[in-house]
Amino acid sequence: MVERRMNSLVKWALILFVLVSIILNIVLIGIHSSRATKCSAQRVHPLRGKHDDRSLVFADLTQEEYLQVQQYMVKQKDLDVSTNRLTKPSDNFLFLIDLSLPKKADVLAYLDGKTAKPVREATVVVFYGARGHIKEYVVGPLPNPTYRKDVTKERYNMELPINARTVTIGEYVLLFKLFDDEVFSKLTKLMKESFDVSGSKMLNAFEQMPRGVRSGDRKTWVSFFRDVSGMYIHPVGFEVLVNHESVNASDWRVERLLYNGQYFETVAELREKYDSGSIKKIVYKELPDYASLKPEHKPLQIGPQLFYAEGKRFSVKNNHVLYLDWSFAFGLSSLTGMRVFDVRFKDERIVYELSVQEAMSVYGSVTPGMMMTKFLDSSIGIGRFAHELVRGVDCPYEATYVDTYRYIDVPAPVRFRNSICIFEHNMGQPLRRHFSDFFHNSYGGMVNSALVFRTITAIGNYDYMWDFIFYQSGSVEAKVHATGYISSSYLVDGSMKHGHQVAEKVLGNIHTHFINFKVDLDVLGVKNVFQTKDMEYVNVSLPWMPDHYAMVPQLVQKELKTEQEAALRYDTKSPRYLHIASKQVNKWGHQRSYRLQVFSFTGDHLPESQAEEKAMSWARYKVAITKHKDLEQTSSSLYSQNNIWTPAVDFSKYIEDNESIEDEDLVAWVTTGFLHIPHAEDIPNTVTVGNGGGVLLRPHNYFNEDPSIHSADGVYIKPGAEDSCDSNRMACLAQDVCSPVLEPFTYNGFEGAMKFED
């Protein structure tokens, strides 16, 4: 009995001991976890360069500068301009204020310490509805402007007609009113039965561009969609052609309607035939919310996160970035978007300007809202729609975020928080590596860590992610990925020739994406040449067997001398290696150069026989090389979309004069993109994977060796020293483990959303 009681006591003592041990371990683990070393917010290793305030010559206008320019223009009584968001097309509206870039020669002299800073000026665009034209001015000097200069003729060599203007918020409000008064209110029965429109329920509009078929036209086909999130893939089968050529809204009129694939001359005709039952009707049907981006299941997981174990190896001050051996200035144009300037590697200027120029799409359809559509996004504003980036999704959580200000179609400058992000990123594969298992055993490699400079622009249905990437090998990449919603049309007879069905009565329309980049390379100065290299097979006899022949690849090199020679079209075979080169040579006697390597999956370009093609003539060329001119600043313009038949900028004219490009300051205009045939997996959103293109600027005999061999990221392992940290920081990583210090999550992106009200 006593023995049994002792055994019981021992058993309970052991159980208690085990429980106490478990609790103590949990407590100790918790204490240890709470004391885990936090990663240093301060950088451990010093920057290799110093910030240079001369970068401010490229800086976007500040909020104060925008306001000073606006106030100066308003005070000019002879201009009689309005800044009201709802300004009517018949009045004079101050539409745009943006930085006016100084002449390149003046900037280079300033950057190189030879002259004073160029005068800081702004470009101002005024839509003179009361006078029937558009004017561009240069206003300066900033910050206290005292003069304005009309530069319209100088920049475009033509007058700009008022119908070349972008549709403003004020004009959209009047168009919406026209639809309410002249269409919806007169088709109440049809609207209710076909689209469930009544009271607060409405349809959303999405417009076709260009607006007509000839210069002077402003006749827009407007397609209507269900009023849901992701409306772009909810077409209802109703389209209206509205004539708004006059600046007086009282003159606007509905000229044609399309309902369920059938055309009608007037609203009255459609109403009469609908009421009499003589047309095929659309019957409203509730549909699942297939356009919603709300996760189907509650998100419970967090994927891998980026953090900096030794602090950030890059620094941002004003508009200047330092990263290891790189430095550059940056800006964000309201019209063309992201751009960088004075890009240097080891303090040598490689690129004067790398910038987005244009994003263009051509659509196919059997219905008018898409049949003629050719979008030229800089005419709406690419940078205009760079909203706040979401931490941990659009960019790594620990990225550095930069605010921007813009003034376009607004009554005052608007702040866009966190609209640019900058981060160093492990690209997921080694930059270089080799494992030696013959004769000498060793491993040498290097992680591919690069700096990413990013913004994302949500232009209507599409979101474009723009990246400039700076590699430790001395390469720079300009890249774009497309996501967002496809444009769609209502499925009618003949639709399937132009795409695939992606939802009930919904066609995903075939379309192209063409993207144009400006690459102003300065390779060891501004006196460069354009070279091409490729290969050919040559039949040679073998020296040790003269009677035996073999086909052997051989290098083919050529220097192109004129702009027309160097305009390399997409519809012809071009050499695979394209170089901007200096006459200076490296250690091995080869001309030092940078190679343009284009990644593209473009569709066919619009035939040149089409009147609209001149406004997008840059897309003829994979790469076109021109002599730098300050008046050839962009490949497109604000006015290309709405006066597409007589464009203010026709890029092909840059090449027409066929100037010499030998020992000149050269600019490469690079076109990339992809053909998009929408498919079921584009619902609800197009993914970025495989949908993009870009250009890589690679050193080619520019150095004497790969500059990354000097990087502190290099790893070298030899037998017997596998655990040594001397040439392999990875061996010590476990000892250096730290936890990141995170910024609190915030999001203010909706502050800059478009509002159709004052």
Image (cartoon, rainbow, N blue to C red):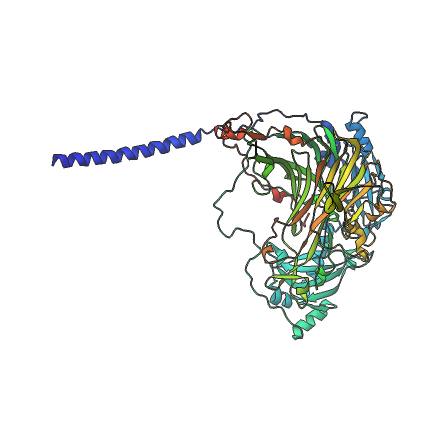
Residue 634, by quadrant, is top right
Looking at the image, is 226 positioned above or below residue 137?
below
Residue 238 or residue 659, whichever sits in front = 659
The answer to whether residue 118 shows anywhere in this view is no
What is the x, y in percent for residue 37? 48, 28
What is the x, y in percent for residue 147? 83, 35
What is the x, y in percent for residue 17? 27, 33
What is the x, y in percent for residue 339? 72, 39
Q: Viewed as shown, does residue 345 lie left or right of 296?
A: right
The answer to whether residue 685 shows anywhere in this view is yes
Residue 267, by quadrant, is bottom right
Residue 528 or residue 322, whichever sits in front = 528
Residue 1 or residue 169, whichever sits in front = 1
Q: Viewed as shown, does residue 594 lie left or right of 137?
A: left
Quarter occupied by the N terminus: top left
At 29% from the left and 34% from the top, the residue drawn is 18
